[in-house]
Amino acid sequence: MTTTISVIGTGYLGATHAACMAELGFAVIGVDTDPAKIADLSAGRLPFYEPGLPELLRAHTDGGALRFTTSIAEAADADVHFLCVGTPQRADGLGADTTHVRAAVAGLVPHLRRDALIVGKSTVPVGTAHELQAVADALAPEGVRVEIAWNPEFLREGRSVEDTLRPDRLVLGVTSEAAEQTLRTVYKRAIGAGTPVVVTDLVSAELVKVSANAFLATKISFINAVAELCEATGGDVTDVSRALGHDARIGHAFLKAGLGFGGGCLPKDIRAMMARAGELGVDQALTFLREVDDINMRRRHRVVEMATDELGGSLLGRRVAVLGAAFKPLTDDVRDSPALNVAAQLQLRGAQVRVYDPQAMDNARAVFPTLAYADSAADALAGADLVLLLTEWSEFLELDPAQAGDLVAQRRVIDGRNALDTDAWRRAGWSYRGLGRPRMEPIVESAAPVAATELELVG
Ligand SMILES: NC(=O)c1ccc[n+]([C@@H]2O[C@H](COP(=O)([O-])OP(=O)(O)OC[C@H]3O[C@@H](n4cnc5c(N)ncnc54)[C@H](O)[C@@H]3O)[C@@H](O)[C@H]2O)c1
Ligand SMILES: O=c1ccn([C@@H]2O[C@H](COP(=O)(O)OP(=O)(O)O[C@H]3O[C@H](CO)[C@@H](O)[C@H](O)[C@H]3O)[C@@H](O)[C@H]2O)c(=O)[nH]1
């Protein structure tokens, strides 16, 4: 008999998980409270940009292994239920809003007709799984036993299919041997021979997830703090980072200095972790995360300062091309996007900003409708006094600096991601500023190289 899986919440995480579970051979039902999202997914249309996912979605909705509904009752007969609903930052503070995970469990459990395993994948404050178990126990129909497990998700947007089908580790927070075996069976086709599986309790599983994101955020802010030092001293953070990364104990990953981290996860998760530590009376353990957050936000202000400085002290009426709106390349996600934050700050200070992003234009318009948007990179560059690269899409890294130079009013670029080929841009007559790097002037090629014989004569 085919195992049936339900996936509750079909956003970036849930839609990916549902399609990948169908790819692994299960019958999958995806449930979401958003009817527009469900209409799109049911028709095989992915309502966001994620490489490789549209093909999986289309294949399995067409093939019948994957279907979607707004009715949680229809999920009741599944063998395993994955919780993938949002846990956004609470409007009234820094903690995570767990309303949706509670609502999902409270919505599902009364419909269950047999024992069930509900597996949390959302990122939650430590202790949530135990609270959900209490909710489930209170609402379970007579004779039905519901077990909550926690299986945190580590996928990265832009690589979510690969990360789901070939995870670098699995964390199974369980309270019974049976739950562990069920999850091992579900993931059997995804885990290669050497994939580590860490089996642990609910609390530790919840903690792994927030700790992983806090560590990644700390690594980025560490190198961005070094960038601040470089800016004060004339050092080049890209060289410092490269040299640091060669130490195998440190590594190159997540050591790229620039505009810092954004997105729907890292910023909210470090704030939620601090808030939870406060609630638990151990806030001192995580006060350093306040610094991590502050360093990160300072980078955004620094780019605005640099832009003002480049334009002689005032942004008023100056034309600024902003390349990038998504929080990173390969996604259309603009949640807490550093690029959009900078674009909005520039506009507030009187600049005429034109933003272009290859995938995130609709989402950007929805969040910042008053910003001006260009139809293409070339359109954004036309007549610009200053160019800002804020999301390192390959389309921008592949721009021909000479052709780009013909479009702008002034050949000045600020590379907020330290990603451009500096020499190529400088040789095309651009002045270049990166973050945590010295200002670089255009390279003027000398017209006639000195002949070797002349050098010998001088020697
Ligand atoms: N996006 C990622 O890369 C990623 C990776 C790992 C973990 N996570 C975590 O996964 C969770 C979801 O993140 P996301 O980025 O997919 O968010 P999202 O906002 O894209 O999706 C959440 C979905 O849940 C739906 N929803 C809310 N309440 C519901 C309910 N009661 N029943 C059914 N559906 C409901 C919403 O309509 C929405 O479609 C968060 O906890 C996040 O921290 C996200
Ligand atoms: O050296 C680096 C690496 C990343 N970033 C920035 O950090 C942010 C986050 O990047 P990334 O972690 O790749 O994006 P997410 O898709 O948000 O993934 C993170 O958040 C997910 C949700 O919790 C987790 O599942 C992933 O493991 C975790 O990497 C982006 O703004 C990047 O531009 C840097 O500034 N420097």
Image (cartoon, helix red, strand yellow):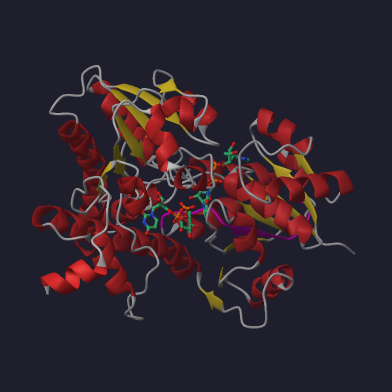
In-image side of 166 versus 328 (left or right): right
Rendered-image quarter of ligand 1: top right
In-image side of 160 versus 446 (left or right): right
Given residues 148 and 114, the one toward you in this image is 148
Q: Position of residue 219 (x, y in %)?
A: 31, 63
- Residue 70 seen in the figure: no
**Which residue is rendered at x = 21% and y = 54% of the image?**
437
Quadrant hosting residue 221: bottom left
Looking at the figure, which quarter contains the C terminus? bottom left
**Which residue is rendered at x = 31% and y = 69% of the image?**
242
In-image side of 436 versus 276 (left or right): left
Given residues 281 and 384, the one toward you in this image is 384
Taking the magenta stretch, the answer to whether it contains residue 230 is no
Given residues 330 and 29, the one toward you in this image is 330
Find the magenta span and give its range. 112-125
- Residue 424 seen in the figure: yes
Q: Is residue 247 above or below residue 370?
A: below
Q: Position of residue 294 (x, y in %)?
A: 21, 48
Q: Position of residue 409 (x, y in %)?
A: 31, 25
Residue that extends furthest to the left in the rendered view of this protein:
233
Given residues 78 and 331, the one toward you in this image is 331
Q: Is residue 71 above or below residue 330?
A: above
